[in-house]
């Protein structure tokens, strides 16, 4: 029984160690927008290096989680698409202009 408990605990630790945060997932999603496989591979390498050097805050992770839902490679070359992927500030709306 003890061996089973230790094995289950180690499996859980290794399973969670492989989890990627929302910001790393967003970076990798943006790499999928690359025009060719060389650019994509270079992008993925850079994203991995950044993930090893930068620890996002919980606020960053929440922002990235929201951007994961709106980011779309087909629109990334537009102003709206850039904003939806976190590559630009959100566009001002009419409601924002009236404040």
Image (cartoon, rainbow, N blue to C red):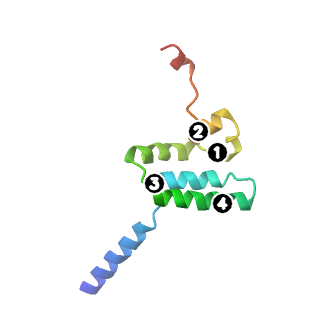
- State which quadrant residue 8 falls in: bottom left
How much space separates mark 2 and mark 4, taking CA atoms? Answer: 23 Å
Circle 4 packing at 10 Å, graded few (<14), some (14-19), many (20+), is: few
Residue receiving disc 4: 42
Residue at 60% in and 62% down: 45
Earlier residue among tags 1 and 4:
4
Q: Specify the label residue 54 is tagged with.
A: 3
x, y percent for residue 19: 45, 63
Percent position of residue 85, x then y: 59, 42
SS state under label 3:
loop
Left-right relation of 76 to 46: right
- The reply to whether the C-beta atoms of the residues labelled 2 and 4 are less than 8 Å apart is no
Are the residues tagged 2 and 1 within 8 Å (C-beta)?
yes
The span from disc 2 to disc 1 (Cα, nearest Å) is 8 Å
- Cα–Cα gap, marks 2 and 3: 22 Å
- Marks 3/1: CA–CA distance: 24 Å
Left or right of 30: which side holds 9?
left
On the image, the x and y values in percent for residue 11 come to 38, 76
Tags 3 and 4 in contact by the CB under 8 Å rule? Answer: no
């Amino acid at each position: 029984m003890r061996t089973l408990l230790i094995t289950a605990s180690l499996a859980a630790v290794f399973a969670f160690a492989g989890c990627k945060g929302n910001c790393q997932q967003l970076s990798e999603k943006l790499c999928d927008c690359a025009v060719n496989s060389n650019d994509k591979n270079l992008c993925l390498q850079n994203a991995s290096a950044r993930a090893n050097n930068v620890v996002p805050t919980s606020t960053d992770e929440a922002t990235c989680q929201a951007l994961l839902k709106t980011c779309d490679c087909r629109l990334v070359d537009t102003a709206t698409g850039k904003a939806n992927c976190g590559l630009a500030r959100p566009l001002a709306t009419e409601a924002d202009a009236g404040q």
